[in-house]
Amino acid sequence: MTDEIKKKVEDKIIGLVKEYAGKKRFKPIDLVKEMERDFAAEGLTKDDIKGVLKDIMDEGKLVYGYAGGSFLTLPDEN
């Protein structure tokens, strides 16, 4: 996977979470499945997308929240 494609996937994941903030809660697997559909033409595998998602989490761009179940959310801006 090229850095360019990785950046596109990252931007798309963060954009989805921002767009639906307060309206919908995404589980990590929901985001993986969505990206698999969107980036099928680039030949990305589930493991590729999981790796990008892990990098996003490690960098603190998304964090886990919990309200009856775990989901990904934007970090609180304090």
Image (tube, rainbow, N blue to C red):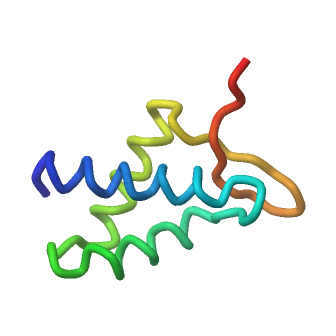
- Extreme residue in the front direction: 19
The x, y position of residue 36, in whole percent, is 35, 77
Residue 24 picture quarter: bottom right
Q: In which quarter of the image is the C terminus?
A: top right
Whether 59 is drawn above or below 8: the answer is above
Q: Position of residue 59 (x, y in %)?
A: 45, 31
Q: Where is residue 51 in the image (x, y as percent from the top left)?
A: 34, 53
Report x, y in % for residue 72. 64, 52
Name the residue furthest right. Answer: 68
Q: Which of 30 and 46 is in front in this view?
A: 30
Q: In this view, does 5 lie above or below 33?
A: above
Q: Which residue corresponds to the image point at 26% horizontal and 73% vertical from the top-left?
A: 39
Q: Is 40 situated above or below 15? A: below
Please tell me how many numbered marks the rendered image carries: 0
Q: Residue at x 65, y 60 (%)?
A: 20
| Residue at (77% x, 55% y) in the render | 22
The N terminus - image quarter: bottom left
In front: 5, or 32?
5
Q: In this view, does 69 lie to the left or right of 8?
A: right
Tell me: 39 left or right of 37. Answer: left
Residue projecting furthest to the left: 2
Q: Residue at x 56, y 62 (%)?
A: 28
Q: Quadrant of residue 42?
A: bottom left
